[in-house]
Image (spheres, grey):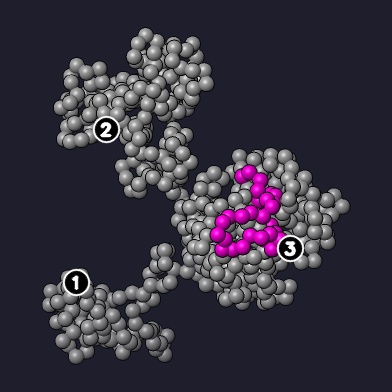
Amino acid sequence: MAAIAVLATSLPFTPVARADNEVLPNPDAPIRLVVDDPAAAVVAAADPAVDLATVSPELAVITTTAGNAAQATELALAAGATDVEPDVEVELAEIIPTDPGWSAWWGAPQLRLDEAWVETLGSSAVDIAIIDTGINLVTELSGRVLPGWSAFADEPSTLDGSPSLHGTKAAMVAAGAMNNGTGAAGACPQCEVIPLKVFRTGSNTASLADVATAVTWATANGAEIINLSLAGTQTLTALTNAVAAARAAGVIVVAAAGNKGLNSDCSNPIPNPCATTPNYPASTPGVIGVAGLDQISGLAAGSSRGPNVDLAVAYTNVVAGTTFGTWLNYSGTSSASPLVAGAIGLFRSLDPTATPAQLDYYLQISSPMPSPAINVAWGALNSVTLLALANSSWPPAPFTDVVRPSFYATAVDWGWNENVVTGTSATKFSPDATITRAMGITFLWRLAGSPAPTIPNPFIDLPLTAYYRSAAIWGFEQGITNGQGGPNTFDPGGVFNRAQSMTMIWRYNGEATPSGANPFIDVSETAWYRNAVVWGFEEAITNGIGGPNVFAPDLPIPRSQNVTMLWRSVGSPTAP
């Protein structure tokens, strides 16, 4: 199991009670003793009351009784051991609810919730807005249903008005209570829910304008996560704008992909990807669209699918029935979506500051594609992997060619998150590729916050539409670069070498005079970059390259080295 096992706090023997209630050890209770010297353990095991249980090159375990433990310890110490201690037990790193429906809820272990709950059961500080048919005040959600909103002036109550209790079931999947004798448990059993009613009592259809308004209301009223267990084939600009505003405010929006799989010719597993008609809000930019998995980790037959759908979790989940102590199956992508919302609630409980964009990336790398592949963009969510990314240092940059660990990995993560560097493609950083002068000054300009220059362009080789134009003019204005190759020429496509990189960083930081001697044998005392390189060495920005006391000033600088120098120049931060 991925989670760390927890040491048991039990005594190493079985207690027995005296008449005066004093608890004494049972002398006949078995006990295991860990001995740090295997040879000494063998000697101790010569005693008839001591048995040798296991031996490895590093340690051994002997077994005896509690009454003979002291003698066995003395024998091992006398034979040369330096440490003898009672063995302790560990527990499985998982939480198994006692709720009656737990054993039937195959979706929870598929998502690895039982292991994720070891890290957190959620928090009342995390509010999940359920935009649906309303939420009833059922036992599963006791004390955790917050005031909400209804789209209908003539139906102001946010209690569930649907015969199937659709919104209440969605809320229970996201945040149902654990160990309360009914149902199973929600993904985030200590999170709170906000009811937002957009379906009239008894109706199966809702206005998308009301949905957009509900998203805006939830954003303004403290929701960290919004769940939308609803779908249609058309959308509104108002909804797109509401989702964009929610994400800008740090709110995660999750939606059901829809249940149109049976109405398509898309088989699963599939030889070639195919897609059902895109549904909204799941296909709205910024929304995490959720498909449903069957019990063997293939897409459920009824689930919509395709490149507009992001990830998948169980299609069928267990919720409390209408009678206390009973449970029901709740199926469809309406059920899958709040399962993801609840898993994100667990993450938010551990890491409340991660942005929606970071969560998108965390969800992608926490959702490996099963084999055979399912027809969604990311894969099947793994909640343990997701929670392991909470409070990461710098969120990992989305580049598959960044070696971890390596001297530049944290620098790349920093540079990507701080918008200092970008990749050469959506998935590649190209750490060994060298950069041009245009790229070099642009990276430094971005580090400065991409300020607008205030002087006319002094260079004749900066096209009006060039990405590096403002950076080069700013660099000239700040005295960081004078160009090269001729009068008024910046030479944007020219080679950017290690001397130029270190000098630009030095100038950007005030051109301080170094206090020590030059440590590099290939840096002349009269070189224009001499002070910059020596200062860089003193500030731990560069240690040279290629051998002892070698800086290699003329060597074209790779992207990995340049971003690392920039990162070190601001103190090598490891967290935002």
Instruction: Kindly identify which numbered label has been placed on residue 542.
Output: 2
The image quadrant where one finds the N terminus is bottom left
Residue 442, how many percent across, how many down? 43, 26
Closer-to-camera residue (285/93): 285
Look at the image and tell me whether residue 148 can be seen.
Answer: no
Q: Which residue is mark 1?
A: 57
User: Does residue 530 appear in this view?
Assistant: yes
Quadrant of the rendered structure where residue 506 is? top left
Type of amino acid under label 1: Pro
Is residue 405 found left or right of 315 in the rendered image?
left
Is 259 rendered above or below residue 250?
below
Local crowd at mark 3 within 10 Å, few (<14), some, or many (≥20)?
many
Label 2 neighbour load within 10 Å: few <14, some 14-19, many 20+: many
Q: Which is the main secondary structure of the residues drawn in magenta? A: loop
Residue ranking furthest to the top: 487
Disc 2 or 1, which lies upstream in sequence? 1
The local secondary structure at tag 2 comes to: loop
344 w.r.t. 490: above or below: below
Q: Is residue 58 left or right of residue 445?
A: left
User: Which residue occupies the extreme front position in the image?
Assistant: 271
Identity of the amino acid at label 2? Thr
Q: Which residue is mark 3?
A: 166
SS of the residue under disc 3: helix
Looking at the rendering, the stretch of residues picked out in magenta corresponds to 257-286
Tell me the distance, in whole angstroms, between the alpha carbons under discs 2 and 1.
43 Å
In terms of sequence position, does the residue under pointer 3 or pointer 2 come before the other? 3
The dot on residue 303 is none
User: Is residue 118 rendered magenta in the image?
Assistant: no
